[in-house]
């Protein structure tokens, strides 16, 4: 790869190669565009609903102002869901029949961008940003876009997210009052497990004539985040990546702690996962709390809908729990934007749009509609957020606002973390997402069947939470990870 880049750089003086690669542009150099003959840019993204409306409004404003002045016209197209977008990108890269060519820019997560770059189809963005400009962005967000040790930047942050704990504060209150439970106990993963057991026992006690009918308290959306961030909080990079090569670090004692604080409470009935997202489970009253993305905050329900009635509920935004005695790491997630390798004019124009879109006021306007996090250092404070909300007269969803302020108020005490890219990173993450959660769901269903057949819940659960059960799963889990990472 590096040899190819050196050869391309050596030939950059030729017009043909310059048009193909955008080479020959010095870092931060201005490329002259013609406002009377604007460069047209196509962007693919996955925004929908309010997020898409906010994005489209900003694109329209750019076209009418800075874009018009500089000679840049942008058109954005939603590809549907994140999965739909990833499939469209993959089809374009593979030049499948009927696939459209890659757009000039596209929203993408790092694993997908890495796969596209391995086909040498992405532009090195350092040609169009000065070091001073890049220094204005949150360091961890920028670092995610460096895939190799060659100082080339392939993914640019436009909006980020992390995780929080969302709580049904209305149904929490009677439980907390009756048991003396505090939300402070929800600061650790182990604390959540203990509270969930207490909640199960409390709800079970409300029907003394019916045995073992306690209710689940908690769920979580992303299991890959649970594994990756949980391990990092315990001092381990689960995916230890060096210049694209991965070593899996599955230390058994650390993985056991994750098993004990997800699988065990799940099969015992303290945790649940029923709907597509855990916010769905809050809405049906099946859980009270979940860990999920900040961008999901706006979907937290306003009421619990049961079979015979519904009840309006309030909410509370709490920090994402960390492993007991662990370091304060939060997940760093959210798609960035990549620029397709083409010619200097289109690549430069794409970067000019990204600079404008991520300017402080513009970026905060977008995040206020989307519950994403701003990407510039000068935008990451509650004071700046409130200033922009007031000056722009923005009508911000209360959950979105509370989510943003909750995370921004923690910004000095937490570190954001995301894994580095490697081949098969996407498939390996899927093992984390589904391996343990699918087993937990299947085993819980078997336990419920046994209880319905007359077994006590304690007897039905017992064979699933033994040392032998963990050892068997752990071996299968490690094998599945190795196969996904190195196939």
Image (cartoon, rainbow, N blue to C red):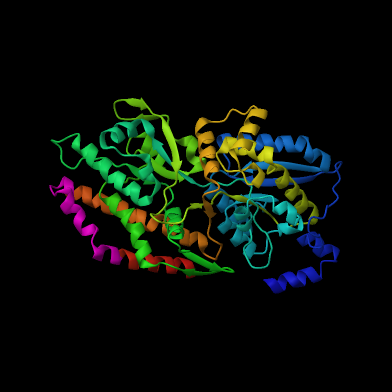
The residue under the point 25% across, 42% down is: 200
State the image quarter where residue 1 is shown: bottom right
User: Magenta span: helix, strand or loop, mainly?
Assistant: helix
Q: Nearer the viewer, residue 395 or 410?
A: 410
Q: Nearer the viewer, residue 442 or 293?
A: 293
Q: Is residue 2 above or below residue 37?
A: below
Which x, y percent locates residue 80? Answer: 56, 43
The residue under the point 45% across, 57% down is: 233
Q: Is residue 291 above or below residue 240?
A: above
Q: Is residue 50 above or below residue 7?
A: above
Which x, y percent locates residue 351? Answer: 73, 50
Is 452 covered by the magenta stretch?
yes
The residue under the point 38% across, 49% down is: 188
Q: Which residues are magenta?
A: 451-472
Which x, y percent locates residue 229? Answer: 46, 56
Q: Is residue 33 above or below residue 179?
A: below
Which x, y percent locates residue 298? Answer: 49, 35
User: Is residue 270 visible in the rendered structure shown here?
Assistant: no
């Amino acid at each position: 790869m590096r040899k190819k880049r050196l050869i391309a750089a050596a030939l950059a003086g030729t017009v043909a190669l310059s048009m193909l690669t955008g080479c020959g542009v010095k870092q931060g150099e201005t490329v002259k565009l013609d406002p009377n003959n604007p460069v047209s840019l196509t962007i693919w993204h996955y925004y929908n609903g309010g997020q898409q409306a906010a994005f489209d409004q900003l694109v329209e404003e750019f076209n009418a102002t800075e874009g018009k002045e500089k000679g840049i016209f942008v058109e954005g197209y939603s590809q549907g869901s994140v999965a739909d977008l990833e499939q469209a990108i993959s089809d374009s890269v593979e030049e499948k029949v009927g696939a459209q060519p890659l757009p000039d820019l596209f929203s993408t997560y790092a694993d997908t961008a890495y796969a596209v770059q391995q086909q040498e189809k992405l532009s090195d963005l350092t040609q169009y940003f000065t070091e001073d400009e890049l220094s204005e962005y949150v360091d961890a967000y920028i670092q995610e876009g460096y895939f190799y040790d060659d100082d080339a930047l392939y993914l640019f942050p436009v909006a980020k997210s992390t995780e929080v704990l969302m709580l049904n504060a209305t149904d929490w209150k009677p439980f907390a009052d009756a048991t003396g439970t505090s939300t402070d106990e929800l600061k650790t993963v182990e604390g959540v497990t203990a509270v969930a057991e207490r909640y199960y026992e409390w709800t079970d006690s409300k029907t003394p004539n019916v045995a073992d009918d306690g209710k689940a308290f908690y769920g979580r959306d992303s299991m890959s985040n649970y594994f990756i961030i949980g391990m990092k909080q315990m001092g381990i990079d689960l995916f230890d990546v060096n210049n694209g090569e991965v070593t899996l670090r599955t230390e058994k004692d650390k993985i056991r702690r994750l098993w004990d604080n997800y699988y065990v409470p799940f099969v015992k009935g303290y945790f649940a996962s029923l709907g597509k997202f855990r916010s769905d489970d809050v809405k049906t009253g099946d859980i009270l709390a979940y860990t999920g993305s900040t961008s999901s905050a706006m979907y937290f329900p306003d009421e619990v809908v049961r079979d015979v009635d519904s009840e309006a509920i309030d909410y509370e935004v709490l920090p994402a729990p960390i492993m007991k005695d662990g370091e304060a790491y939060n997940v760093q997630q959210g798609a960035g934007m990549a620029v397709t390798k083409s010619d200097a004019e289109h690549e430069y124009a794409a970067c000019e749009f990204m600079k404008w879109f991520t300017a402080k006021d513009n970026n905060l306007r977008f995040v206020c509609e989307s519950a994403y996090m701003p990407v510039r250092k000068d935008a990451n404070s509650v004071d700046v957020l409130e200033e922009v909300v007031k000056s722009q007269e923005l009508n911000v969803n209360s959950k979105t606002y509370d989510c943003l302020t909750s995370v921004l108020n923690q910004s000095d005490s937490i570190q954001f973390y995301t894994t580095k890219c490697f081949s098969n990173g996407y498939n390996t993450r899927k093992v984390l997402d589904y391996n343990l959660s699918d087993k937990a769901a299947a085993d819980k269903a078997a336990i419920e069947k046994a209880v319905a057949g007359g077994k006590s819940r304690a007897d039905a659960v017992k064979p699933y939470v033994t040392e032998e059960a963990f050892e068997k799963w752990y071996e299968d889990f490690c094998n599945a990870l190795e196969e996904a990472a190195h196939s």
